[in-house]
């Protein structure tokens, strides 16, 4: 295949309002390029085109999809939220922009609370929400913690420092997608109504092709809708994980019981993995004769 990287960094910076407007210009240029390539090579079909866009680039790809019909696939990597969340479909990425639109949401937390820059709502044929789609492992979660981390590491100035400090979760989307291309781990994702139900092990059914594959191999599954999965909780590569359902049965106690549940996994070679925090280091009340699933 041919790969074309679109470098529009000079138009994608500050002020954000201008960068938002600039995607129309970039989309127009890309449309002209694709039309030229198709005119020069009649065997090239729009269905063969796969556009991959991160943040504003995702909506830019959607704009191209409104101009060139029947583009094969658009992958939106954490599409930008400011100025787009809740906007009409004509000005943002949406399912009609390509034959197949897959989305990876990684930074969909509230913008005012933690500067979440990613689109939260479902806007594709299939939407993946790794780790809930709001905050990613290894990234600071709140504005204060991001600023504190930035100051401690000397990253309070410079474009790269700002990116690492404020866009860590936002940028995880293209890290996941890149790893998925050649990974032996399939980034298997499970259909579920919510992240809470997923972490409570209520949605681990992959029968009849219900599950999907986040990233490059998403079209290999016919599953559609919202999907959840966990990645490496240390935020390190390899990011892909395999999932296990853990059930913990509580016995009988004469007093109220509170605690944290951690689990270790030992394989058939006596190699130990973990401990994994099942309750995210939060004390929970444990009720007699109850089962807890994670």
Image (spheres, rainbow, N blue to C red):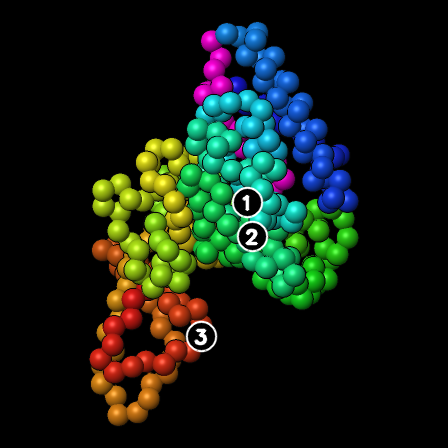
Q: Residue at x 40, y 48 (%)?
A: 226
Q: Are marks 3 and 2 in contact (CB under 8 Å)?
A: no
**For the view shown, which residue lies furthest in the bottom direction?**
254
Q: Residue at x 70, y 62 (%)?
A: 147
Q: Are marks 1 and 2 in contact (CB under 8 Å)?
A: yes
Q: Which residue is mark 1?
A: 78
**Residue mark closest to the camera, 3 vs 2:** 2
Query: Residue 11: which disc?
Result: none
Q: Disc 1 to disc 2, how far (Cα)? A: 7 Å
In-image side of 106 versus 277 (left or right): right
Q: Which residue is mark 2?
A: 107
- Magenta residues (range): 43-58
Examine the image and state in which quarter residue 267 appears. bottom left
- In the rendered structure, which disc, 1 or 2, sits on the residue that comes first in sequence? 1
Asked if residue 288 is positioned above or below residue 65 in the image, the reply reads below
Q: Which residue is mark 3?
A: 282
Q: Disc 3 to disc 2, how far (Cα)? A: 23 Å
Looking at the rendering, in which quadrant would you find the C terminus? bottom left
**Residue 61 position in % (x across, y down):** 57, 31
Asked if residue 72 is positioned above or below residue 257 in the image, the reply reads above
Camera-side residue: 238 or 242? 242
Camera-side residue: 190 or 124? 124
């Amino acid at each position: 295949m041919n790969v074309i990287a679109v470098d529009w960094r000079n138009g994608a910076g500050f002020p954000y309002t201008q960068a938002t407007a600039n995607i129309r210009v970039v989309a127009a240029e890309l449309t002209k390029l694709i039309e030229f390539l198709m005119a020069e090579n009649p065997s090239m079909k729009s269905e063969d085109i796969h556009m991959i866009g991160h943040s504003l680039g995702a909506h830019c790809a959607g704009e191209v999809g409104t101009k060139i019909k029947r583009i094969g696939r658009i992958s939106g990597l954490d599409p930008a939220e400011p100025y787009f969340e809740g906007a009409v479909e004509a000005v943002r990425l949406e399912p009609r922009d390509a034959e197949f639109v897959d989305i990876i949401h990684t930074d969909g937390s509230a913008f005012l609370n933690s500067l979440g820059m990613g689109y939260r709502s479902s806007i594709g044929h299939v939407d993946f929400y790794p780790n809930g789609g709001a905050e990613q492992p290894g990234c600071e979660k709140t504005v204060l913690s991001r600023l504190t981390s930035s100051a401690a590491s000397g990253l309070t100035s410079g474009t790269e420092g700002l990116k690492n400090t404020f866009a860590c979760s936002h940028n995880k989307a293209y890290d996941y997608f890149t790893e998925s291309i050649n990974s032996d781990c399939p980034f298997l994702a499970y259909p579920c109504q919510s992240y809470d139900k997923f972490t409570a092990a209520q949605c681990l059914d992959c029968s009849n092709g219900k599950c999907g594959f986040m990233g490059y191999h998403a079209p290999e599954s016919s599953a559609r809708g919202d999907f959840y999965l966990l990645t490496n909780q240390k935020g390190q590569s390899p990011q892909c994980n395999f999932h296990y359902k853990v059930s913990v049965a509580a016995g009988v106690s004469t007093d109220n019981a509170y605690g944290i549940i951690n689990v270790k996994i030992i394989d058939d070679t006596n190699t130990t993995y973990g401990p994994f925090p099942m309750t995210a280091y939060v004390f929970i009340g444990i009720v007699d004769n109850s089962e807890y699933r994670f």
